[in-house]
């Protein structure tokens, strides 16, 4: 890769123009300066590691750029000169933040604002983002993408763009653009490159202005099969045995965004047969499953988890999915359903699987009901997968070797790898995510512990006696196989 001849920009200055549809803040973040020189596309980057930008430009403009090396300071100077405050986004919007409702509607429908919003969504899809954050700050509108579980700042715009952009998102989602004081939720249908997206929209008032978060859900990609969830062989067998039970309740725990819904959908896809009636109650319905009756709760009209669950028990179901147990009433109805011949799946927000039994008891569910109905307790987290193109195999550190002693059976072979970063993974060292699990079938000994209101520590001792793996221990096995890094596992599972 050759260094760029700066004299070209001086001798052919009148032929230089920026590429449309790329934000200055994004270019600064990825450290690249693309431009037209006549009819040809050129790209200046400070290092070959930034070459991924060339692929992005080629996909968007159907033209491979001529790539040259240049100093980072020189590139940033050119970005500022040619891309800062582009007319189509900053100059065509009124200087003062509009308060008149009709003016706000007009600005939200203007071509520059429409193009900006559409472009942000398109780029998020190209970069495999799951969420887009539009955040109104004191002096700017900040845009961030969540990619592989972590937020990345993509762009900042003048504060005057915040009201039109957020109003545009509200219009697309069918929300009230005049309401700035209360949170609102809506949905957008959007098409990118032949792919249909369901976008969940959530607005939130803040001190510096409204914040909007978009959750991107692909209707084409659907959900993963059970075989592709990242389950170890023993965990896969245990989960198959659990979902094969004729009745009882299976609880999956973990924070928001840990993949619980994906796991439950994968389980339902195996059970979805013509001789079974499956009904789900969700908030929201993230993916549509053929052959499954799915119900979206609507608390504003009184359709809560508990009310929907009472009704579907009269609808002759075999298998029930309750999106989340949030209160005592829902918990008691779900458990009663499990005790009367139904297989019930649900989720709870607890730190680990065994904490689910304690959490239900804390809600007020009688221990004998928990012990009699539970057939399996699970927890999961998502970890980033090391990029196979650049991950480097190294000697394992002492910290990892010490942690490995926790495993009931140490791995025979260790392939310890660390993240490096390359064009293929956009310099992050990771590409995609996989899950780590802990799965505990409920046996008679665990039932007695639950019945006796045993502490979490006593429950964990039960798990150790049976050589069941915790989240951390399952993560360590994946580190030993070179799937992910130790830092990733400790980030999501702790020590």
Image: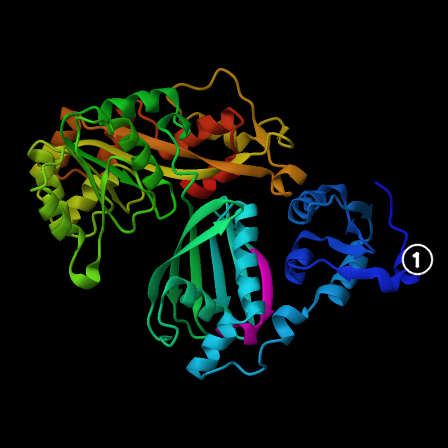
Quickly name the residue at label 1.
7
Residue 58, position in %: x, y?
A: 69, 45
Where residue 429 sits, quadrant-wise, is top right
Q: Secondary structure at mark 1?
A: helix
Q: Residue at x 68, y 49 (%)?
A: 61
Q: Where residue 460 sits: x, y (%)?
A: 27, 33
> What percent of the width, then of the height, locates residue 66?
80, 45
Q: Position of residue 281 (x, y in %)?
A: 21, 46
- Left of 1 or right of it: where is 326? left
Question: Which quadrant holds residue 466?
Answer: top left
Q: Is residue 157 magenta?
A: yes
Magenta span includes 268:
no
Q: Quadrant of the C terminus?
A: top left
Is residue 377 in view from this perspective?
yes
**Is residue 317 positioned above or below 212 on the image?**
above
Q: Residue at x 47, y 78 (%)?
A: 104
- Image vertical order of residue 215 relative to residue 477, above or below: below
Query: Is residue 126 shown left or right of residue 423?
Result: left
Instruction: Give the camera-side residue of 130 and 494.
Output: 130
The foreground one among 225 and 465 is 225
On screen, residue 301 above or below 391:
below
Residue 494 seen in render: no
Q: Tag 1: Cα neighbours inside 10 Å, few (<14), some, or many (≥20)?
A: few
Q: Quadrant of the N terminus?
A: top right
Looking at the image, which residue is at 53% across and 62% down? 117
Query: What's the magenta region?
Result: 153-163
């Amino acid at each position: 890769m050759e260094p760029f001849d700066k004299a070209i920009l001086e001798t052919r200055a009148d032929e230089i123009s920026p590429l449309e549809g790329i934000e200055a803040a994004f270019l600064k973040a990825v450290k690249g300066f693309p431009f037209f020189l006549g009819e040809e596309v050129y790209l200046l980057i400070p290092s070959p590691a930034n070459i991924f930008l060339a692929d992005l430009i080629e996909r968007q403009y159907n033209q491979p750029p001529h790539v040259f090396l240049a100093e980072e300071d020189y590139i940033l100077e050119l970005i500022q000169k040619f891309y800062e405050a582009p007319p189509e986004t900053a100059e065509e919007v009124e200087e003062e933040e509009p308060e008149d409702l009709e003016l706000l509607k007009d600005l939200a429908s203007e071509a520059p604002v429409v193009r900006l919003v559409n472009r942000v969504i398109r780029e998020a899809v190209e970069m495999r983002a799951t969420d887009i954050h539009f955040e109104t700050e004191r002096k700017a509108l900040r845009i961030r993408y969540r990619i592989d579980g972590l937020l990345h700042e993509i762009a900042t715009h003048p504060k005057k763009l915040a009201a039109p952009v957020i109003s545009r998102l509200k219009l697309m989602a069918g929300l009230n653009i005049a309401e700035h004081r209360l949170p609102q939720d809506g949905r957008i249908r959007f098409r990118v490159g032949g792919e249909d997206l369901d976008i969940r929209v959530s607005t939130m008032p803040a001190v510096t202005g409204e914040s909007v978060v978009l959750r991107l859900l692909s209707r084409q990609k659907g959900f993963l099969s059970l075989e592709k969830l990242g389950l170890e062989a023993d965990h896969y067998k245990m989960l198959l045995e659990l979902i094969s039970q004729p009745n009882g309740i299976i609880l999956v725990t973990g924070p928001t965004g840990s993949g619980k819904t994906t796991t439950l959908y994968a389980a339902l896809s195996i059970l979805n047969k013509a001789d079974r009636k499956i009904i789900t109650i969700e908030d929201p319905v993230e993916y549509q499953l053929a052959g499954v009756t799915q119900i979206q709760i609507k608390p504003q009209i009184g359709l809560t988890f508990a009310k929907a669950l009472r009704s579907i028990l009269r609808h002759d179901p075999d298998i029930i999915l309750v999106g989340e147990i949030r209160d005592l009433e829902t918990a008691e109805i779900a458990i009663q359903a499990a005790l009367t011949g139904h297989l019930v799946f649900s989720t709870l927000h607890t730190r680990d699987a065994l904490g689910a039994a304690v959490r239900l008891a804390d809600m007020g569910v009688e221990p004998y009901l928990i012990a009699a109905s539970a057939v399996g307790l699970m927890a999961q987290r998502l970890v980033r997968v090391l990029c196979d193109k650049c991950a480097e195999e190294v000697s394992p550190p002492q910290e990892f070797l010490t942690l490995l002693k926790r495993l009931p059976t140490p791995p025979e072979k260790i392939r310890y790898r660390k993240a490096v970063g390359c064009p293929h993974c956009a310099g992050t060292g990771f590409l995609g995510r996989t899950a780590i699990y802990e799965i505990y079938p409920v046996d008679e000994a665990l039932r007695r512990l639950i019945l006796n209101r045993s502490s979490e520590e006593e429950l964990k001792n039960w798990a150790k006696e049976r050589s069941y793996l915790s989240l951390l221990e399952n993560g360590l096995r994946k580190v030993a196989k070179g799937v992910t890094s130790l830092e990733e596992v400790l980030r999501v599972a702790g020590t």
